[in-house]
Image (cartoon, rainbow, N blue to C red):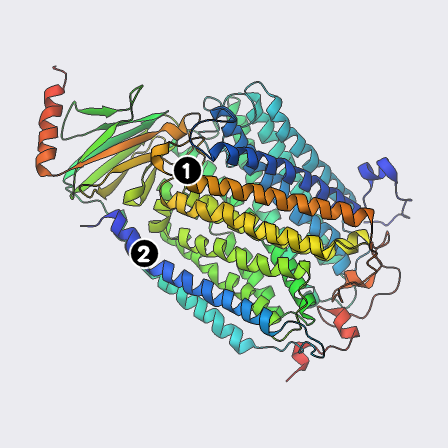
Amino acid sequence: MAATQNDFSDVQAVYLPIAAVVLAVVFAAFLFAVVRYRARDGRAAKPTREHNALEVAIALGLAAIVAVLVVVTFGVDDDEAKVAGRPAFRVDAVAFKWGWQFTYPGLPGVVDRTTDTAPPALHVPAGREVAVRLSTRDTTHAFWIPELRYKRDAWPDVAQTFALTFPAGQHLSGHCAQYCGLRHSDMVFTVQALGREDFAAWVARARGRRPGP
Amino acid sequence: MSVAAPLAPARGLAGAVVGTDHKSVAARTFITAFGFFFAGGVVALIMRWELATPGMQVTSRAGYDQLFTMHGSTMIYLFVTPVALSLGTYFVPLQVGAAEIAGPRVNLIGYWLLAFGGVIAWSSFLARNGAAQAAWTAEFPMSDAPNTPGTGMDLWIAGVMLATSGVILMAACQLATIVARRAPGMTMLRVPVFTWSMVVTCLMVVSAFPSLLIAMGGLLLDRHGVDVYPGAGGATAYQHLFWFYGHPVVYVMFFPFVGASLEVIATFSGRRVFGYKGIVLSLLAFAALSMAVWGHHMFTTGQVANHYFSLTSTMLAVPAGMEYVAAIGTLIGGALVLRTPMLFAIAFFLQFLLGGLSGIYVGSPPLDYHVHDSYFVVAHFHYTLLAGSVFGLFAAVYYWWPKVTGFHLRDGLGKLHLALFVIGTNVTFLPMFFLGYDGMPRRVANYTPADRWTTLNVLSTVGAFVIGLSIAVFCLNVLVSWLRAEPAGPDPWGGQTLEWATSSPPPRLNFVAPLPPIRSSEPLLDLRGVPAPEALP
C-alpha cells in the first residue's frame, strides 16, 4: 500500500544527496579557483583554450544525472496517481471561504465542519488507505497535510480524488495552501487518525449524534 | 527606413521626457526600476515586521494581502524585468558597435509605457477597497469581480498590461539592434556574451510576454461582465496563459545577469571567457526549453501532464550546469582581481546555486506536492531572484558604473555592501526553506504560537533588515562617489568589449574614433595580442 509520505521520502532520498554533492563540488571549485589563481605579482593569466571534449563530457554527465532523477520521479509519480478501487474509507472534503467540510460516504449524515469558533477535525482510520474526494464551493483552495507530504488544489467544478494513508498516534493538522482571500491563514483543520477500536467508537458516537430523519 | 539629418538632442527636462538616445532611455529605465525596487523593498520590510511574531501587529489582513500582492508584482513586473532590459538598452548598442539603438522612438515609448504602467498599478492603493489583493499571479477565479471587488484590481491589471507592453517594445528594439546594427566584422559568433544573453532574453520577451497581455486582458473583460474564463476550464486556461508568460519571465530575470557576470569574471580574470560557443549553445537550449516548462507551476492542480513538465524542467539542469562550467573554466587559469564587481559576480553563481538546486527539487511532482505554495517555494525563488539575480545585477552595476557616469564607485563601501547583502539574504531566506518544509503556507498574514514558527520568522525578519541596511550602504556609496568623484577614464578594468573603446560616458553617437577591428567576441583583447582559443593548439 502506497503512502504519500513514503513516496516523498523515497524521492527525496535520491534528490537531496545529489544536490548536496553538486553544491559541494561547485563551492569547492570556486574556492579552489579564487585561492589558487588570485592575481599575484609576476603571474599573468593563461590564454583561454578550447576544451570541447571536456565540455561535452560534463554535459553528458549532467544529462545522466537528469535521467536518474526523472526515472525516479516518474516511477513514484505514477504510483502516487493510483487510487485503490476499493479504499478502506472514503472522505468528501469540501473547501469554502474560509473553512472545510468533511463528510463520509460510508457514514451518511456525519459531518465535520468549520464552526465560528473552531476548526474541524477530519476523522479517518489509521494505517489504511483513505480516498479523499476534494472539491470547492467557491474559489480555488488547496488541501495540505504537511506530515503526509501531500497537497492538492481544490479546483472549481471538478472534484479531485487522491489516496492518503494516515499514521496512527501522531498529531496531524492540515492547512489551506492556495491563497483564497481575507482569512486564508485561518483555514486550518486537525486530523484524528484513529486505531481500529477508537475509530469504531467514534463511528458509533457520530451515528448516535446524527440528527434523526 | 529613410535617414533624416539628426536633430539636436533635447536637453534638460525636455531631454528627460523626449530624449531618444538609448543611453539616456536606459538610465531613466534603470532609475525608474530602482525606484520601484525601493518601494517594493519597503513593502517587504513591512511584511517581515508583521510576520515576525504571531498575531496582527502592523497591518490588517486586507492590508497584508495588498502588501504581498504589490511586493511580488512590483519586483517582477516593475523591477527585475525592466532593470534587466535597461542594461541591454544601454550596452547592447555599444557592444555591437552601433551608434544608436534600432527604433529609438519605439524604445522611448516602451519606457513611458513601463513608467506609467507602474504608476497606475501603484495608484491602486488609492482605490476604495485598496490595492490589488489577488497575488502577483492574479489566479482566476480569485481575481474575478466577486472574489476581489474594486477598482484597485482593475487599475493593477491596466498597469501590469501597460508596463508589460512597454517591456515588449524595448526588447524588440534590442533584438532589432543585434540583428541589423552590428558593426562590420561582428558575426553572430563574435557577439559578446552579455549581448548573447540579451538575444535569448529578448526572444523570450517577444514570444512569451504577449501571453500575459492575453491573460490579463481576458481578466479585465471577465471582471466587467464578459464570460472569458467560465468554470473549471477557465481557471485552467488562465493558469496556462499566465504561466506561459510566468515561467519564461523567470529566465528573463536571469539570463542578462548570467551574461553580465560571465563578462565580469572574464575581465577580472584577465582572460577570455571559457567555452564561448558552449555558452551560446546552452543559452539557446535554455531559452528553448524554458518555453516548455510552465506546467510545473500546476502540478498540484491535477490538470497538467506531470511527466512532460517534470522532464523539461529537470533538463534545465544541463544548460544551467554549462553556464557554471563557463564561469569555473574562466576562473581557473586566470589572474583574479577581487574587486567589488568580481566578488558580486562570484557570489551570484554561488548563491544562485541554492535557488537552482531547489528548483530541480520542486520540478519533481512527488516533492512539489509537499512544498508547493509553501515558504519552501518562497525561499526557492528568492534564492534565484534576490539572492541570485540581484547579485548579478550589482556585479553589472559596479562593473559598468564608471562607463555610464565617468566615475568609480568606492571599492571599500562596495565590499561592505556585498558582505551585508550575503549575510542578509541568507539569514532571510534559509529559514524559509525550513518553515515551508515544516508546513507554513505562503501568503498567510498570520500564524499561531502553536505552530512554533516564531523563532525562524524572527530570524528571517532580522535578515530582511540587514538586506535593507546593505542597500542603504549602496545608496551611501553612490552619494559619496558622486560628491567626491574619482574619474574613471575610458577603460578602468582592462575591458574586453567595444563599450570600453569609447569615452566614459560615451558620446551621443557612442563612438568618435573608428572601431577597432572585430575578429572575436573580445575585440579589445585582440588589440592587446591575446590569442583566441581557436588559435591555440
Please give the residue where the numbered disc 2 appears in the rendered image. A11
- The 10 Å Cα crowd at callout 2, few under 14, some 14 to 19, many 20 or more, is many
- Number of numbered discs: 2
Asked whether the viewer can see residue B471, the reply is yes
A55 versus B357 height, above or below = below
- Up/down of A75 relative to A56, above or below: above
Q: Quadrant of residue B94?
A: bottom right
Protein chain holding label 2: A
Residue A80 on image: x %, y %: 27, 49
Left or right of residue B6: residue B337: left
Q: Nearer the viewer, mark 1 or mark 2?
A: 1
Q: Which of B28 and B460 is in front in this view?
A: B460
Q: Kindly state the secondary structure of the residue where label 1 is placed.
A: helix
Question: Does any portion of residue B81 appear in the rendered image?
Answer: no
Instruction: Tell me whether marks 1 and 2 sit on the same chain.
Output: no
The residue nearer to you, when weighing B463 against B146, is B463
Which residue reaches farthest top? Answer: A213
Give the residue type at disc 2: Val
Q: Name the residue under label 1.
A: B454
- Give the residue drawn at x 73%, y 77%: B530
Dot 1 surroundings within 10 Å: few (below 14), some, or many (20 or more)?
some
Question: Disc number at residue B505?
Answer: none
